[in-house]
Amino acid sequence: MKLLVVDDHAMIRAGLRQLCADDPVWQAAIILEAQEGALALMLQKKERPQITVLDLNLPGIGGLELLRQILAEDPAARVLVFSMHSEPVYAARALEIGARGYLSKHASPVELRTALARIASGLTYVESEIAQALAAQAGEPRQMLSERDLEILRMLGEGRSFAQIASALGLGYKTVANSATAIKSKLGVARTADLIRLSVEMGIGRSAP
């Protein structure tokens, strides 16, 4: 059994290694690690891990886009998103792309083991509170946001300008501005300030210090 852990925090990767070492089911597993997208894609292609544990906050390419690329490279990949984001908007998008499960980093080690076991068995797993929130929010306008929309909205909530977002995502300024206009339409607001407020209220971004 091979398990690929994609996370830019060394402590998270070490914690997952220890969790596997302490579990008889996973003690013999080969733990592969990647801290960014290019290495993750290379390992996915070369090693074909049975399960990939994927964070969404990664340097360079965003986690949702990386998820899409992993599944394009290996449609049979079983990906468990393991993220600090417990907001249903992220879980909905990840599951739509093809993740087999979604778990927040607030979950207990027992629940993480349960998620891994279910996904290894070909089943799916979504943290119960997130699953309930997904059911409650079905049909909300925010569910129409694309991966790029979410990235732009998150960066706006972090206090970044259009120019800074364009630089970070490798896009033109006009592309980001047009995307922001489209997001306003989807969420029913008129001003960029409203997008920033909604980003913070939705838990996607945070106010700049």
Image: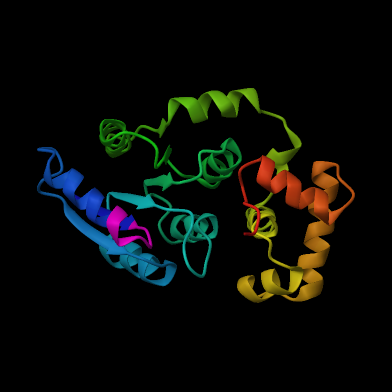
Image side of residue 60 versus residue 175, left or right: left
Residue 200, placed above or below residue 66:
above
Q: Note whether 2 is above or below 108 in the view shown.
A: below
Query: Residue drawn 79% across and 58% down?
Result: 180
Residue at 36% of width from left, 32% of height from top? Answer: 123
Residue 82 image-quadrant placement: top left
Q: Within the magenta stretch, is there residue 10?
A: yes
Q: Nearer the viewer, residue 10 or 131?
A: 10
In the rendered image, residue 9, in percent from the top left (x then y), is placed at 35, 60
Q: Quadrant of the C terminus?
A: bottom right
Residue 163 x/y as whole percent: 74, 74
Instruction: Tell me if 84 is positioned left or right of 45 in this view.
Output: right
The answer to whether 43 appears left or right of 102 in the picture is: left
Q: Residue 93 appears at what percent x and percent y?
A: 58, 44
In the picture, measured across the screen, residue 106 lies left or right of residue 113, that is right
Report the residue at 66% width, 76% height from top. 167
15 or 73, nearer to the observer = 15
**Residue placed furthest toward the right:** 190
Could you say where residue 50 lies in the image, as x and y percent from the top left? 27, 49
63 falls in the magenta region: no
> How many numbered discs, if any?
0
Residues drawn in magenta: 6-12
Q: Nearer the viewer, residue 158 or 49?
A: 158
